[in-house]
Image (spheres, grey):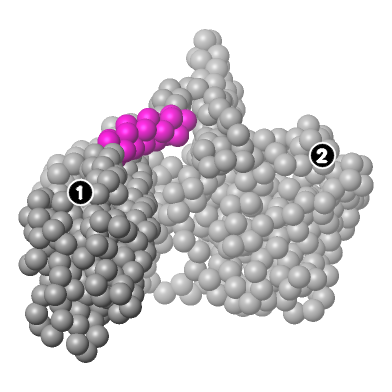
Amino acid sequence: MKGQRLSVRARLALWHTGVLTLIVCVFSAGILFFVRESMFAGIDRQLYRALTTVDWVYHHEPEEIHDLASESGIAFFRVVVDGKLLYQTGDWERAGLTGAPVEPGAAPDSWKGSDGTWYRVQAVAEPSYTIAAAVREGARRDALWTLIVILAAGIPLAAALAVAGGYFLAGRALAPVGAMADKARQITADSLGERLPVLNPQDEFGRLAAVFNDTLARLHDSFDRLRRFTADASHELRTPLTAMRSVGEVALQAPHDAGRYREVIGSMLEEVHRLTHLVDSLLVLTRADCGATPPVREVVELGSLAGSVADHLRVLAEEKRQSLVVDPGARVEALCDPAILRLGLMNLLHNAIKYTPERGAISVRARETASGHSSIEVQDSGPGIAPAHRERIFERFYRGDAGFNGESPGAGLGLAIARWAVAANGGRIEVESEESRGSLFRIVLPGR
Amino acid sequence: MRILVVEDEKKVANALREGLEADGYTVTLAADGEEGFGLVSREAFDLVLLDLALPRRDGVDVLAAMRKRNCMTPVFILTARDSVEDRVLGLDTGADDYLVKPFTFPELLARIRALLRRGRAESALRLQHEDLWVDLATRKVARGEQALDLTAKEFDILECLLRNPGRTVSRDMLARQVWHVTARATPLDNVIDVTMVRLRRKIDDPFETKLLHTVRGVGFVLGARRE
């Protein structure tokens, strides 16, 4: 592109001016045309009367033709018979109309006489004679000229006013955009809670501001989650580190026997194990966040996948004397990455076993939903999830306040991993739960 | 058996040397890739433990140069990079095995033994420790005269323990060898612990001599621990 582009305001003003000038020009041309037409129509009627009068007199009282000018006031006419001039008024000659192009039978025409005045001239012709007459255009032509001058001077003036007015109006109309830009510039990572003012939600700027605010809200939300995640992660990482440090420091304060040192080192190694597990889980999630784990999809029979995951974890349920039942049901297939889905289901089922009390019941089944999706349902008889927690249980590090029956709580990443694993396969996890009546987790996947 | 350890992190290198020497190996340390490559070109080793992220010369580079010179010493890679591409790159370049840091020492020892043993036929079909024996062909287990009924996983764990008599077997090792799970972000630890409790109930609880012991923070060991 050549040069710098004009501002929106200037472009709006120019367009405005261009369109307005065009309208004024067309309008002026129209006016001129009609004024001229009506002016000539009046003159031409007068001319026609003069011609018919002269013609009538020439036919019926030819001798009166000489007095006609003085008696009727018809000042300009000429009668030519057989190519010879029979009579012409003195004014005709004086006005210099002698040379006027008088084409018999033609429409009236304008002619500038030698005295500088404009005349309207017309002629009638019979085989033997021609009568020509003329009428002064006089003040009417002056009026027309005045009108032309006024319009010619007025159009540039109007255009100039249109530029100024357009520029002003465009400025007024665009002012909210400028205000929005200023406000948006003030919103930084620290003040993401602020919003652009929406004056009228129905108009274009209102909608623009609403869209922008919507984006801001999402940004705010993800910033919040990131902040919380960082805080939680550092807390979770510090806990085992603190344990290791204090256990080690305390052990070194006084000499102990080998057995005691073995205990201390073992305890520290347990924390290392916990830390390793945590870092590995975080890595899975972080890789997922940056899309480094693309799923490799294939057709997976969900029932057998659920069965194998359940077999994997069955010892845990048996140890708590829970019944873990896999309902074989019909064959349900989905297109997904079996390894990732397995990881997700394993975390989900592990969660169910963990929260379900001893002698509880857990059932897993694959089935096709009414809407044609493939699903795996995990129903437990645990304490259920209060509505307040239901949305948040999938957040990283979020742990509900339900009891663990003495088991150590995990890092709170299991369900987050489950959600990622299912989402990576194009699905979602639905939760139905009633407090004290168990929960139903449903993995919904697109069918084949 | 001579092992060359190429590792720039001093603490890790010293721990490796101490641990390997305790297991009867002769250990030489190299602190960077250049030094490691120099040593491996001049001297004969039975095994090279190679870190991938090394100063002066990258581990993969050292490995590639070794293989190019037809040096076929087994190479065991230790790496903190655990993406699939890194692993494939290492194995493609000619590594014989790899472990992702942080690894457990018992597993490293077991893998090194397996590497050095490679090529020699595994003929044993019957593993035994004191009065506990396992028949790998019939999958029968017994202690003394009394036959024991184990599940498939319990049997596999026992086999793994019997193959490493007197040595600690870590959870990571069991996860890989018995459950065939390499991803560590799975809720497998509880499963391993519970399965181990059940195995102990069957092979130890009814008997006077206890064979299966837990090594806190590390894993499990069959028989008296060898210090």
Instruction: Return the residue found at the far top.
Output: A253
Residue A85 at least partly seen: yes
Q: What residue type is labelled 1?
A: Asp
At a point 21% along the width and 65% down the height, the residue shown is A66
Nearest the viewer among B186 and A63 is A63
Q: Mark 1 points at which residue?
A: B58
* A66 on left or right of A346: left
Q: Where is residue B111 in the image (x, y as percent from the top left)?
A: 42, 56
In the depicted structure, whether residue A17 falls above or below residue A182: below
Disc 1 vs disc 2: which is toward the camera?
Answer: 2
Q: Mark 2 points at which residue?
A: A387
Nearest the viewer among A302 and B72 is A302
At a point 26% along the width and 42% down the height, the residue shown is A146
The chain to which mark 2 is attached is A
* B210 on left or right of A402: left
Q: Which amino acid does label 2 sit on?
A: Pro
Q: Give the range drawn in magenta.
A: A156-177
In the depicted structure, whether residue A446 falls above or below residue A437: below
In the image, residue A175 lies in the stretch drawn in magenta: yes
Residue A135 at least partly seen: no
Nearest the viewer among A5 and A353 is A5
